[in-house]
């Protein structure tokens, strides 16, 4: 057939256009609509696009169609169809070997190839075979366990898996419910018949800050419970924990509870999924709403059964009369109802402590099989793809452009919309090629600093007190006098680099207009914030913008802003068709924002072995985690914003990592200077018993008392979560090896123990990258390492054994634990390096090339 090539994919012969230079990934996704292989890095460095060619794993993003020839291509979908994936599906779910799941199909393909070669792979063999596959969420140890489980042939009943629970495909209401009075919403134009219970929080008196104050729950005629929250799930599995809360409080089976998340037309307003606020904020209002719904169902059953409500109990999806044993199912109580009940929060009394029952499995089979759809996997009729012309360096301005060559490409539309210059085409490769064909001349930017002179730049360019939450200053006593009178005085400066979030799923948005109303699908952590940003940028009413968050491939604080959504919406309006914009990996590295860099000056003084003076100044990074838990009669703590040469923004735990690194390193230095044991020195200066307990728990589990000379420890509090981390290291000819990490964590009442452990493990792995190797390098307004091959994130072979010690506090409200465990990793390792070698490293990353210079 002229102009066509035949290839065999998943056992089926397919015919595609004869353009042999195209990547296999492009052909699979854009021409065959096979989306299990993911866009990740574009250079074969992350493994998200892994497929089999003649049963050998290859990176489809760097494999040309011409390289495939007549060989058989098998994607994760094909493995699922022929049964080769069954054992891995069950094993991945049993081990909870995923968080956001974006990397999981590629992992499963690589694991299938390994198991075909080796029936009983060792840990070393697994790490070597899968080292090219990145799990940015850090579930490496669980993935390895899952592969071993699958190799052992552990039986798994796949048909017992919980169904996928994601944002439902709901009809669009007449107006967003968050912008409509509770009693005027068109609930039953969107939902089936049943009962809707709405929590009315009352007037905000300003005494309690919360990211969300509202929630509503629908109980359907078939007994299905649907709860609505503005939070979203970016891998922390708050979906499971929040469903557990609703099921526990309402008395419903977990598999009957669904959660609609992050749809701005039908979900309650929420500031965003950040700051570990899902449990304390969304968990609180969902529990109260479920409690209110339970009360309404009890009252309805009281009338139906003609008994006093005090005799009734709700459990397992039914209301039961305890003396007689009679019962009525939730669905029967609300059948044929179209009832809305608004309940004042002040009138709700939740049952109290959670049951802390964990589900048998985390995640769903479609995550492993590739059926789960992320934003880049979505499609709409007449969908087109957009690519944006970017400047060559920060601060460059466009002087002139010539678009004739780009416009001559068949099927390409060039869009010139004020400051937006873009190409729109039927596929992303054509759009990108057209942008590259635009001849643009740029005015060069003013002289800018490089990473080599960053500390001097930040010191010499203070900004007004507007940084992260504004400036911060806390002072007590006379610090300068106490330092002058100290028997031991220690001063040091600590620095941390800018680092990137590196979610495997880059920023992506799909926008579609229907008349004057816009819908945007995008993987953001702030759907309501993006709704406002898009409306503001396009000059349309906020009520006409709907943002829907599909499953998102990680965020880590990096998906707060709405640039990609605005770009897609503007292009969709310009070409009168749905448009998807997906940032390349280079765009993600270059035009996203970074975790702020820090320069931190610390001075401490001691008399008689006791800390008497503490001075701590953070330049640029922020005030998160800046306050010290250690007692000192004279203390001065301040944050000084600076003019950052790079765009900076939220990141997992934000400045708390830098502040803990400086504080815990300095406390360790002071303890050693005084000849004191670092754990005992900390305990002597701590008054918070919860922090004392996690410190002791980590030290005891790590074997601190055994006298191991290569241990380091650090602890802290952030976002009402208490953490202590102990690290053991080894130096082999100056090459640093992390041998073991133990983290004790107290986040209040534990709702989902395995989910908590998974989050701590993942945060620890991410913390390893920032601690050891990650740093954004820049010069002349350009990022010089904008790709995964030059920006080293943790991989299988980098991860040591990690042990988590959860401390349950059932009498204390749950705090989020997705961020806090990252803060103690770097200082624990730095302190361990000192114990092992006598070398004190005061800059992160600690070992950019993997070695320690003596």
Image (cartoon, helix red, strand yellow):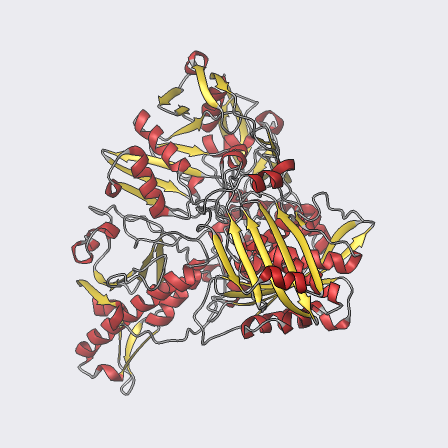
Residue 667 shows in this picture = no
Q: In this view of the protein, which residue sits in the foreground, 343 or 365?
A: 343
Residue 610 position, x and y percent, is: 66, 70
Q: Residue at x 73, y 73 (%)?
A: 705
Q: Is residue 271 found left or right of 801 in the rendered image?
A: left
Asked which quadrant contains residue 848, the reply is top right
Q: Is residue 781 found left or right of 572 in the rendered image?
A: right
Residue 80 shows in this picture = yes
Q: Residue at x 17, y 77 (%)?
A: 303
Is residue 157 placed above or below 171 in the rendered structure?
A: below
Q: In this view of the protein, which residue sits in the foreground, 286 or 623?
A: 623
Asked which quadrant contains residue 210, the reply is bottom left
Q: In this view of the protein, which residue sits in the foreground, 503 or 124?
A: 503
Is residue 318 placed above or below 589 in the rendered structure?
A: below
Residue 433 position, x and y percent, is: 49, 21
Q: Which residue sits furthest right? A: 733
Is residue 429 placed above or below 55 in the rendered structure?
A: above
Q: Residue at x 34, y 35 (%)?
A: 511
Is residue 517 placed above or below 371 in the rendered structure?
A: above
Residue 629 position, x and y percent, is: 56, 66
């Amino acid at each position: 057939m002229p102009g066509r090539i035949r290839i065999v994919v998943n056992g089926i012969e397919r015919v595609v256009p004869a353009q042999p230079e195209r990547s296999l990934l492009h052909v699979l996704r854009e021409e065959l609509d096979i989306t299990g292989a993911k866009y990740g890095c574009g250079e074969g460095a992350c493994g998200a696009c892994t497929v089999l060619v003649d049963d050998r794993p290859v990176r489809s993003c760097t494999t040309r169609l011409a390289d495939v020839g007549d060989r058989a291509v098998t994607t994760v979908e094909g493995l699922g169809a022929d049964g080769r994936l069954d054992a891995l599906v069950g094993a991945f779910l049993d081990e909870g070997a995923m968080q956001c799941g974006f990397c999981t199909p590629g992992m499963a393909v690589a694991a299938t190839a390994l198991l075909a070669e080796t029936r009983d792979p060792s840990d070393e063999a697994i790490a070597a075979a899968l080292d090219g596959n990145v799990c940015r969420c850090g579930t490496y140890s669980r993935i390895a366990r899952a592969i071993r489980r699958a190799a052992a042939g552990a039986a798994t009943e796949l048909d017992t898996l919980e169904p996928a629970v994601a944002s439902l495909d709901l009809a669009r209401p007449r107006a967003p419910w968050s912008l409509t009075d509770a009693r005027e919403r068109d609930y039953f134009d969107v939902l089936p018949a049943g009962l809707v219970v709405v929590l009315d929080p009352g007037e905000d008196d300003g005494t309690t800050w919360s990211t969300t104050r509202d929630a509503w729950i629908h109980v359907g005629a078939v007994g299905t419970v649907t709860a609505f929250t503005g939070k979203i799930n970016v891998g922390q599995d708050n979906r499971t924990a929040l469903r557990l809360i609703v099921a526990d409080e309402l008395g419903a089976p977990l598999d009957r509870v669904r959660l609609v998340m992050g749809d701005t037309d039908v979900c309650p307003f929420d500031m965003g999924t950040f700051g570990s606020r899902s449990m304390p904020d969304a968990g609180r209002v969902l529990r109260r709403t479920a409690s209110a719904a339970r009360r309404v169902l009890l009252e309805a059953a009281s009338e139906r059964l003609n008994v006093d409500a005090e005799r009734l109990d709700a459990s397992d999806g039914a209301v039961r009369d305890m003396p007689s044993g009679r019962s009525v199912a939730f669905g029967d109580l609300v059948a044929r109802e179209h009832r809305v009940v608004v309940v004042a929060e002040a009138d709700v009394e939740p049952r109290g402590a959670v049951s802390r029952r964990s589900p048998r499995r985390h995640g769903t089979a479609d995550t492993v099989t590739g059926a789960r759809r992320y934003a880049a996997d979505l499609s709409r009729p007449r969908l087109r793809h957009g690519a944006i012309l970017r400047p060559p360096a920060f601060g460059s301005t466009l002087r002139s452009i010539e678009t004739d060559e780009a416009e001559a490409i068949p099927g390409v539309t060039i869009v010139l919309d004020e400051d937006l210059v873009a190409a729109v085409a039927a596929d992303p490769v054509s759009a990108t090629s057209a942008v590259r064909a635009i001849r643009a001349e740029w005015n060069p930017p003013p002289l800018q600093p490089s990473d080599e002179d960053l500390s001097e730049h930040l010191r010499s360019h203070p900004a007004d007190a507007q940084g992260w939450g504004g400036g911060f200053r806390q002072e007590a006593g006379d610090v300068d006098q106490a330092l002058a009178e100290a028997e031991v005085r220690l001063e040091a400066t600590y620095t941390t680099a800018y680092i990137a979030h590196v979610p495997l799923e880059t920023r992506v948005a799909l926008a579609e207009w229907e008349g004057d109303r816009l819908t945007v699908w995008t993987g953001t952590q702030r759907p309501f914030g993006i709704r406002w940003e898009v409306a503001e940028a396009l000059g349309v009413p906020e009520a006409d913008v709907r943002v829907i968050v599909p499953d998102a491939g990680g965020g880590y604080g990096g998906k707060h802003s709405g640039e990609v959504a605005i770009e897609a919406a503007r292009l969709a309006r310009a070409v009168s068709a749905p448009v998807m914009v997906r940032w390349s990996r280079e765009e993600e590295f270059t035009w996203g924002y970074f975790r702020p860099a820090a320069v931190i000056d610390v001075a401490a003084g001691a008399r008689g072995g006791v800390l008497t003076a503490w001075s701590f100044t953070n330049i640029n990074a922020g005030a998160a985690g800046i306050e010290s838990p250690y007692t000192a009669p004279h203390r001065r703590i301040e944050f000084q914003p600076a003019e950052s040469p790079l765009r900076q923004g939220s990141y997992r735990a934000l400045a708390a990592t830098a502040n803990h690194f400086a504080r815990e390193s300095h406390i360790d230095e002071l303890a050693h200077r005084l000849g004191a044991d670092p754990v005992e020195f900390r305990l002597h200066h701590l008054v918070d018993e919860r922090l004392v307990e996690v410190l002791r728990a980590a030290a005891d589990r790590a074997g601190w008392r055994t006298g191991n000379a290569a241990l380091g420890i650090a602890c802290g509090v952030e976002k009402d979560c208490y953490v202590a981390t102990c690290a053991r290291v080894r130096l082999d000819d100056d090459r640093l090896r992390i041998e073991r990490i133990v983290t004790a964590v107290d986040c209040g009442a534990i709702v989902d123990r395995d989910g908590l452990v998974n989050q701590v493990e993942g945060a620890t792995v991410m913390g390893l990258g920032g601690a050891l190797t990650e740093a954004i390098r820049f010069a002349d307004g350009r990022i010089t390492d904008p790709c995964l091959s030059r920006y080293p994130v943790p991989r299988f072979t980098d991860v040591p054994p990690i042990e988590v010690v959860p401390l349950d506090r059932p009498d204390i409200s749950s705090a989020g634990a997705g961020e806090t465990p990252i803060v103690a990793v770097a200082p624990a390792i730095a302190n361990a390096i000192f114990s092992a070698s006598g070398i004190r490293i005061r800059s992160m990353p600690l070992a950019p090339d993997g070695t320690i210079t003596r």
